[in-house]
Image: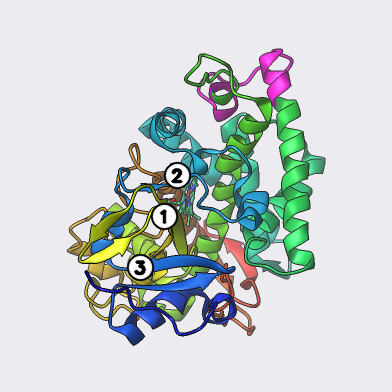
Amino acid sequence: MSNIPSSPWPDSTLALLSDGYEFISKRCRRYDSDLFETRLLLQKVICMQGEAAAQLFYDNDRFQRQGAMPQRVIKTLLGQGGVQGLDGEAHRRRKQMFMSLMTPEGIQDIAALTAEHWCAAIMTWENRDTVVFFEAVNDILCRASCQWAGVPLPESHVQQLTKDLVAMVEAPAALGLRHWQGRLARNRAERWLAQGVDDVRARVCPALETSAAHVMAWQRDQDGELLDRKVIAVELLNIIRPIVAIGRFIVFMALALHEYPRYRQMLQAGSEEELTWFVQEVRRFYPFFPAVAAVVKQEFVWQGYRFPQGRWVLLDLYGTDHDPRLWEQPEAFQPERFRSWKGSAFDFIPQGGGNHHQHHRCAGEWITIELMKVALRALTQEMEYAVPSQDLRFSLSQVPALPKSRFIIGNVRAKP
Ligand code: HEM
């Protein structure tokens, strides 16, 4: 049995804050190993990266999710009692509820709704000198996600909800005020959505039978009981929050079009395939979630290393998507690479790996790809715009990352 390489420092939390997305890959390079051990938030943790590590991580017999997430993530990003912390049969049932919404028709519906909101938004942008693209896209996605999910959203509530959804994503890694704003945002949104569940159940506000609000309001757990309204609020937020979070990828996509302008022309008359390659490369290349967490269910040995029961384990998503053994020139932005990508479930994992139904892989990955394609068509085929001088840099130590200026555009014109 070999010893897992371990960090000489008693705790690496400060290093995690400064290295951000590169925390795991830097140390794997340093120790010339796919895994190493350290402490984060004073707790022992095994960090790992690469395709083989991802395959191991998604073995449901070896890892569980219960107890894997720190309170600061649960209180902001995830909420209490949601699908992310479930295991076994409880997870299978709950995940099935999410996946039942991800039918080709469901995905087509949200894509069509979002395209309508893009059209309306572009017209309003024509009357403005400049538009902060991040905020404007979040607004589109917030409206479309609530409409699709069957959650009535009064006009007066759009701005606050959009801000709250963004705050929840920004809070887990934030310190001080920004962290607490994320907690408040979650409490406010959960209260509002739980009230909506009562309305759906009392048929005060009938939701479309195929909508998330309806499906969730009438979902039953293993014992045949309706889900608690607070849990439904958490799960509805697991739909609308991440749909709005796609706005970050869309900003990075606009940045990619700006920094690699040769693709713009190709995409103006782009085939469906070419649009997909571009979207996939944006999801691979730009940072979003750095890692996912689990806990060892029962002691086992892997590649000669002992994983003790209860050990916290992190899988590096960003590092695996930039692993030079899997991706030629990983630091180059090359959508064409997806022409020959064979589609392993463990080498390209911006939204987790494994199987969407059986594992914790992101339930909304197909929606993400479709809504990014809707945005890419809008950016290349439906509008013209200028990108005034601004600070477009982003830092890999800031989680979640975003260009400093949040991408400002001007002189917007709808294409005839
Ligand atoms: C899980 C990323 C969009 C719903 C996850 C996970 C990641 C992720 C990393 C965890 C995987 C794991 O634990 O193994 C993202 C990113 C998105 C995105 C980067 C785009 C910005 C979406 C969308 C939806 C969604 C649009 C819903 C419409 C979920 C749900 C889970 C999940 C419900 C929990 C799945 C489970 O625990 O079984 N996502 N996601 N996500 N995502 Fe996404």
Residue ID for mark 3: 48
Q: Nearer the viewer, residue 194 or 373?
A: 194
- Membership of 74 in magenta stretch: no
Number of the label disc, if any, that sits on residue 366: none
**Helix, strand or loop at disc 3?**
strand
Quadrant of the rendering where the N terminus is positioned: bottom left
Q: Nearer the viewer, mark 2 or mark 3?
A: 3
Q: How much space separates mark 2 and mark 3, taking CA atoms?
A: 24 Å
Q: How much space separates mark 3 and mark 1, taking CA atoms?
A: 16 Å
The percent coordinates of residue 213 (x first, y second) are 60, 27
Q: Which label's residue is closer to the chain start, 3 or 1?
A: 3
Ligand 1 within 8 Å, label 2 CB = yes
Q: Nearer the viewer, mark 1 or mark 2?
A: 1
- The furthest residue to the right: 156
Check contact, mark 3 vs mark 1: CB within 8 A. no
**Side (left or right) of 84 relative to 100:** right
Q: Residues within 10 Å of mark 1 (few under 14, many from 20)?
A: many
Residue 312 appears in the rendering? yes
Task: Give the residue at x 53% y 55%.
Answer: 246
Residue ID for mark 2: 364
In the image, is residue 269 above or below residue 196? below
> As shown in the figure, which amino acid type bears the numbered disc 2?
Gly
> As shown in the figure, which amino acid type bears the numbered disc 3?
Met
Q: Nearer the viewer, mark 3 or mark 1?
A: 3
Residue ID for mark 1: 351
**Helix, strand or loop at disc 2?**
loop
In the image, is residue 406 above or below residue 108? below
> As shown in the figure, which amino acid type bears the numbered disc 1?
Gln
